[in-house]
Amino acid sequence: MSPDAMRVRLHLRRLRVLEVTVDEPERLEVVVEDTRSVVRCAHCGFRTRAVHDRRRIRVTDLTYGGRPTTLVWLRRRFRCHQCGERFLEECHPEFVRNRVTWITRRLARGLVRDVNRLPIRELSRRWGLGWHFIMGLVASWSSRVVAERRRRRCRILMVDETSLRRRHRYVTVLINGETGEGLGVVKHRDANALNGFLTQQGHRWLKGVKVVVTDGSESYRSAIRDRLGHATHVVDRFHVARWFASGLIEVRRRIQRIGDKGSRPAYHPEIFGSRYLQLTRADRLEPEARARLETILTTDPDLAQAWELYQALHRIYTAEDNEGANEALGEFLDRHYTRSLPEFEPLLDTLLRWGDEIFAFHDTDRATNGRLEGTNNKLGVLKRIGYGFAPQPTSATEPYSSPPQWHHGVDRDEGLIPRHRADPTSAEGGASMSSPTTVASCCKSHTPTEGPTSTAKPKAIHIRPRTDLRSQLQVRVCAHNRKAEGGLRWDHP
Ligand SMILES: [Zn+2]
């Protein structure tokens, strides 16, 4: 009977298979060597080919046909004729290592990708690798991805805060609004945190930023004025909606009380029970809900007025354009001066302070922080999943990243094949039975690319010239003030 003549390539560049030492159904072991025979001396740079001895290093590779595969790399020690020193061959470009663990680079890529779907602990169990080793791979990958992302131009920058531990550890999260890619998670939520990040990014990158969306925090605003004065600053509409709601909530709290503290019922059951209904936008109310709300609103004229004011404020955002928004604002002011409620006065103050940033919403094609809130939600989920683990420095203070999309010619398969459920027909990513190894499709460097987002041409941003809202608001307010003769107590800036 003739021996098995099937030949499968290793697909690892600069490696030659010398021998298959173990070829069992549950295990494969292949001895390999670097194809280069001449190397430069590590001490004097003289070229030498004299091998002093060889060491055997076990390198874990992707499974081959479902079989766990180990490459035994004969790492050579050379002798230099020039200086007489002996030196060890440097780490092969296809391998990654820490102190004791060696794996192939393609396995490292697969591990980083699979972290997206499996816990590190599970991967560690399947591959017999240390948890910290895999975590180290993920961390080094994420820092490379973030460095790459930060180099790219960002036209819409989204900034928001979130807490990693409520009331204790706050961070500032920054993402690219067009691609949704995270740019960084910076410690603290003050002007210094944002300033530090922006300073790192450099003048040229900052010049590329056209729109900044924040959550309406004064400290972020001061950093943006310093560093991104040329960009249009928008305050996120969902945060503003919360400001809008505050007046109505305060009015409701004032009027809902019907009994002393501790008595039952202390609150008007209908008014208190419909508190969420009151906060719903009028155009989103179902007919029955609307009818119920109207009955409740008739019980108190202040509540009805507060609700009308609140709805008028919403129309600033539901308006089609800046003109419509200005009309809605006018409507709110007219209504407010007809029958003013003290609970809405702080809101007028806020409108004066943040008017430009609120109205910039319409100038920037309705930019919001929605995307960033989604990212914050993911951070929260990650944090909860990670509960109980020792705090890793990479989790909170360093930038996070999504798993990579590889463009390496060899590594085309989707994720790793689990050892026990591997596809036996797949010749992808395995060790070969024979030499030589030729990898023509392998790229020189493994620079990260990130899917279609990096190549897609970005959409143009149209920023319309903003109307001078502040002066318009002031003129209106002054006129009303004169009419009301001190009926309002807030000062004009
Ligand atoms: Zn030498």
Image (tube, grey):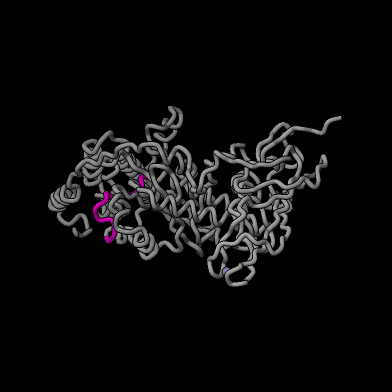
Left or right relative to 183: residue 473: left
In which quadrant of the rendered image does the N terminus lie? top right
Classify residue 223 by image quadrant.
bottom left
Viewer-proximal residue among 301 and 173: 173
Name, please, the residue furthest toward the top. 287
Viewer-proximal residue among 225 and 395: 395
Q: Is residue 416 visible?
A: no
In which quadrant of the rendered image does the C terminus lie? bottom left
Q: Residue at x 48, y 43 (%)?
A: 450
Left or right relative to 338: residue 184: right
Q: Which residues are drawn in magenta? A: 226-237
Name, please, the residue furthest toward the right. 1
**Membership of 477 in magenta stretch:** no
Question: Residue 354 at what x, y percent from top left?
Answer: 27, 52
Left or right relative to 76: residue 289: left
Judged from the image, the quadrant occupied by ligand 1 is bottom right
**For residue 166, above or below residue 314:** below
Viewer-proximal residue among 291 and 11: 11
Q: Residue at x 68, y 52 (%)?
A: 33
Q: Residue at x 46, y 42 (%)?
A: 276
Q: Residue at x 49, y 48 (%)?
A: 447
**For residue 311, above or below residue 484:** above
Q: Is residue 468 visible?
A: yes
Classify residue 117 by image quadrant.
top right
Classify residue 319 by image quadrant.
top left
